[in-house]
Each structure stands twice: as structure tokens, then as C-alpha cells.
Image (cartoon, helix red, strand yellow):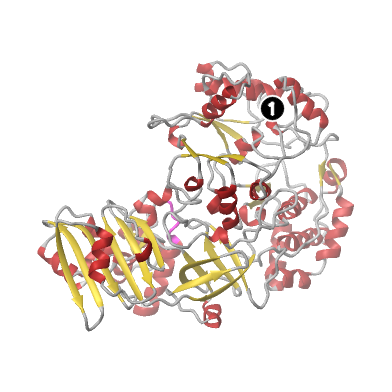
Amino acid sequence: MHLPVKAGSDVWLFNGLLAYLEEHGVVDTDFVANHTGGAAETLAVARDSAGRLEAVAKACGLPVAALESFYALFARTRRVVTVFSQGVNQSSSGTDKVNSIINCHLLTGRIGAPGMGPFSITGQPNAMGGREVGGLANMLAAHLELADPQHRQLVQTFWDGPRMASAPGLKAVDLFEAVHAGRIKALWIMATNPVVSLPDADRVREALKRCELVVVSDLFADTDTAALADVVLPALGWGEKDGTVTNSERCLSRQRAFLPAPGAAKPDWWAVSEVACRLGYTGFDYQQPAQIFDEHARLSAWGNDLQKAPRAFNLSGLVGLDAQGYDNLRPLRWPVLQAGQETPRLFADNHFSHADGRARLVPTVPRAPANPVDEDFPLVLNTGRIRDQWHTMTRTGRAARLAGHLPEPFVEMHPYEAMLCGVQDGALVRVASRWGSMVVRLRCTADQPRRTVFVPIHWNDQCASDARVGALVNPVVDPLSGEPEFKHTPAAVTPFPVDWHGVVYSRAPLAFAPDASPAYWVRIQGDGFFRYELAGRGALADPQRWSRQLLGAQPGWLEVQDDSTHEYRTAALDGDRLLACVYLSPRAELPSRSWLNRLFTRASLTEADIVGLRLGRSVDPADDVGATICSCFAVGRNTILDAIRDNGLTNVEAVGRCVRAGTNCGSCQPEIRALLAEARATEGV
């Protein structure tokens, strides 16, 4: 069952479920009475805000029958796991959404036992580990509470600290506001790219321009944030690091480097320790990660009274590990109270992380997103990830195989909304909000809900002309978590007319002269080449001069200029090896990219290849495998369609047996199903 709930309506959904469970007697009364608090108040709020199915269905944008089916399914199924992630967290009421989910599990006693419970899966690498060491502005290390005076005293005593914070620091959005206002003069940014990833990203960029000292630790110097840094420190990547990571089920695992540190790159802990020592602080004389881990384990056990009010995060069983013991550490789920003994499941004893041992049901009142749509911005902009990319593409964008699936920044929109906005599938459009705008390509799909649009978060100024969706996202945050409202920003989509289109291939990355930069460009990593999709406003007076200025001196040229169609084609050759090519046209119909990709992987061109370069199309249709569908095995759209038609394939499994597509990670299987449906519609297969 799929419930396409309206963005921001999750509290209505789960408050409605809570009221439904109470009404139908699906309540673990013994568990609620003996192991929870706050049930009466929470149920009263749920009944008041979401007690009627019809009202909840309207708030969520769902049919009443579908909503009731979901509630009934949850009610009659004892073993239920509710998995939630950024779609719930990234909201101005994200904390309420999470609490509304947990409430349903507490009311039914579906927690702390196999096959049941609320399950948060966060989107950051080692996010759990970051929280364990206090890597947030509102918490202390070892899951100790900054607001608790006793916890503050524990940490201060353990570290013999002369001073101790007594109030939360600034979360990300507030921090950059402080930088913008001049209250923060120096900033050290590690392992993140906020000029791309934060909301109201143009303001973030302006804040960094104003900051007196910006230090950035990163793997790559060519990021939007590093471009604004006064100092860039080379950091280690995942395969070069040595330490531990913790996953969503509390499983702590050793991570051993399998690559040597390149050049001058250093671990983050080393960089922080060296700076601390230079500033005159003691206690930072670590020589290896094992020493830091031992200190981490000791703090988790410090003042952790197992008899009175034990803290769940406890690594006392790992205290005193020597370097060899640390290196040989096997995966364990905390708490680890004795050496080698993990805790497979939290809350199995119905004891929770409050002083009285009871869990809390929290009353949650549904709230609409802070910024409603209006006449000027009638669409809800939702942001998120695509299948083959990660965050701001600083690493995944360099992998040709991953870049081939969805190579350009885009906005997805329902065809009916596209008609209302006067925009066409495949055309360039401007997406705008009150905070910023971007130019991307339109992808029409009936899978996108009406009155909404979706834009991926990945593209940035290093690889595209104007595709940072963070610049559009409103900066409203959850008052408790500080999470921004990434899933709901009022937006508008309008045409972005252009006069010409182009595609350029080159063995080396290119730089556009300021007076010759097209209105739209995106750089795509290929297998031994770079591809640029272009579009411009105003006719190119001299395409040959423009192309040769862009590509620079080359050993030899192949050139065709058709004055009747205003098309221009040129290729740079070194003997029979293709070095670069340019195709320009007033129309969007340009040569097959999969064909050109293949030409650039060949050591030498055939006569037929050279004829094809002149014509702007392959003389052999087999060369055009189509857009990438399966990244794992580099299987293109045309290859799959040909296999379906030639072999009478009728299901995903048959396609996999024939061309391997969809047989590895499986994430391309929905697209394969769509191609099967397309083939049935056009060929009657």
C-alpha cells in the first residue's frame, strides 16, 4: 500500500492513527499503565485534532477508504516497524512528527520486541556516531544532556575543564545567521558543503564572504564552500580513515583504512588536536584513534549508575582496550556493559531513558508548514535525493557510471501542472521562490502529485550554471531540532526560452569565458571525458570562433556548418583519436549522447565513425544504446527496449536474465517496469 500523503501532514496522519487505535480498543493497557506517562493528555489532543477520518483524509490529501485501510492494517498487525527519515525530520514540525509516530507504538506496546518499533534512519554517514560524541550544538558527548546540571558537572569533572557551556550553541541555520550579522568572526567547516546544502543558500554564501576567517576541511578543493575559504585543509576520505562508525541499530563497528592517506591529507582528529595544542590547550596529545576511543568509552561509563538511573549509552565493557584490542574490535550494539557482550535490543525490559524509567507519550498538535502557497508561488517545492548521487556530488559526481543515469539537474512536475504553467516536457524552465531561483530541465511525470514539484539537492556551481536548489528553500526550522523545512517551499515554474542548444565533449574540463558563457550549462563526468549540455540566449554570431576559443588549439579539425539549418558540427582529432566535439543547433534535437559516449571510449575511430561525426548521428543504430537505466551494468534504454521487443520479454526478471539490468542493486527495476509497459503500449508485447 502506498499513501502519497501531502507534504507536512504527517502529524494529522499519525494523530488520526492514535485516535483510531483508541477507538477500536487496540491499546496495550498494562504496558501503558505500568511503563508510560502522558497517555491521557496525548489521546485527548489526538481525538481533538484528528478524531474524524474524513478530516484527516482531507488534511493528508488521501481517499478516506485508503486511510481507513492503512489504520486497520496497522491495528491488526502486531509486528509493525515504522521507518522514517528525512521526509519526516526535515520540517518545521519534524519533532512533532517523530513524537506522533512514537506515540502509536507506545500506545500499542509495540516497542522493544522483535519485529516492532519506531526506526529512524538518518541520511548522514555516521550520524549516530556523531551524536554519540556530542557533535551537535545542543548536546554533550556520550549522550549527556546539556540542559542537565548534573550531566554538565560530570563532563566538566571528567575532563577537568575550567569552563563548561551551560546553554546550547548555534545550530546550522542560526550559526550562519550569526556569521552574516558579524557575531562570528572565524569558522571552521568540516565534512560539509553548506553553500549548497543549507536553506536560503545564497545568504549562506554571502555570510561566508563577510566572515573574517573561513577554514574548510574537505577531500576536494573544488566545492562551492571551499571556493570561499581562506584556508583549505586536505582531509581523509572514507576509505582512508581509521576509527569507528555506528549505524541506526546502535551497532558500533571498527572502520579500518584500506587506502593510504594521499599527499598532506590528515585525519580530522589530528587537525583538531594540532590546532588545540597551538592554542595552548592540554590534553590533546593523542597519537592514535585507539586513545580517543578509550577516552570516549570512559566518559560513557563515568557516573553511569547501573542501579539508579542508568544512561543507555554505555561502553564500560570496552574501557581499557589496547591498540590491538581496538584494532580487532568486532561489531557490537551498545550498551556494552561487559567485554564482548552487546545488547541486541533496547527497551526489552520496558525500562526507558527517563529518571522514572517510563516512556513518554507526547501531545502533538498538527501544524501546517510555516510558508503557505499563494498566487505568486502556487506550487509546493519538495527536495531530496536521486538514485545514483549523494548530497552535493563532490565524490559521486566524479563517477562516470553514476553520472550517466540522470545527468542534468531537473524539476519533476505533473503534466497537468506543466500545462497550467505553460511549460513543456524536456524544456528548460526557471523554478523560483521568495528566496531564490534556478534554471533546470523539466521532467513531466504523472507520479508527481498535483500542485507539487520535486528538485534534487545535488547540483552546485561547480558543475552547473544555476542549479543550487538550496538557494530556493525557505530557512524556517523546527524550534527544537533545528531541521529546515526542506520538503515544503512555495514555488513557481515559468518557461526559460533559449535560442540555441548544444553539446560539447572534451578530454579535459573546460572553462567558459565570461563574455561567452551560455545561459545554461551543466558538466557531466564521462569515462575519460567531460560532457557539457548547453543552451544560450541570443544567436552565436560565429560558432566556429566560439568553439575554437572554448576548446583551444587542437591537432586537427573536422567541421560542418549548415547555413540552411543554422547547425554547426565540429570535432577535434589527433589522427584517428577523438579529442573533442561540438554540436550546436537552434533545435533541441542533438546527436545521441550514448553514441558519442562510446566514441570517446574507443582508442581509434573507424571511417564510419568519422562519417557519423560529420552527419551528427551514427551510421550503425547498434551504437545508440540510449540513456542509462541500469548503472550497475551500464545498460541503456534502447538496449532494454530492443531486448523486450526481440525476445518477447514480459517481466523484470526476464529482462534481467537477458541483459542483466536490474539484477544487482535492483533500484532500476521500476524504470524497467515502465519500459515493459511502454513496449506493451506501442508494440502489443
Between residues 234 and 659, which one lies in front from this camera angle? 234
**Image label count:** 1
- Is 442 contained in the magenta span? no
Give the class, few, some or many, for how many residues have Cα within 10 Å of label 1's Cα (few <14, many ≥20).
many
Q: Which residue is mark 1?
A: 314
Residue 136 shown left or right of residue 633 in the figure: right
Going 38% across and 32% down the picture, which residue do you hit? 262
Q: Which region shows up in magenta?
A: 665-669
| Residue 206 percent across, percent down from the top left | 58, 53
Up-down relation of residue 46 to residue 36 (above or below): below
Q: Is residue 490 visible?
A: yes
**SS at mark 1?**
loop
Up-down relation of residue 90 to residue 452 (above or below): above
Residue 14 shown left or right of residue 149 in the figure: left
State the predominant SS element of the stretch in magenta: loop
| Residue 646 percent across, percent down from the top left | 27, 70
- Is 666 contained in the magenta span? yes
For the N terminus, give its image quadrant. Answer: bottom right
Residue 677 shown left or right of residue 69 in the figure: left
| Residue 422 percent across, percent down from the top left | 51, 82
Up-down relation of residue 645 to residue 98 (above or below): below
Between residues 224 and 664, which one lies in front from this camera angle? 224
Q: Given the image, on which type of amino acid does mark 1 rest?
A: Asn
Going 67% across and 34% down the picture, which residue do you hit? 134
Residue 521 shown left or right of residue 75 in the figure: left
Q: Is residue 444 visible?
A: no
Up-down relation of residue 503 to residue 242 (above or below): below
| Residue 285: quarter of image | top right
| Residue 35 percent across, percent down from the top left | 83, 41
Going 28% across and 72% down the picture, which residue do you hit? 584
For the C terminus, give its image quadrant. Answer: bottom left
Between residues 650 and 174, which one lies in front from this camera angle? 174
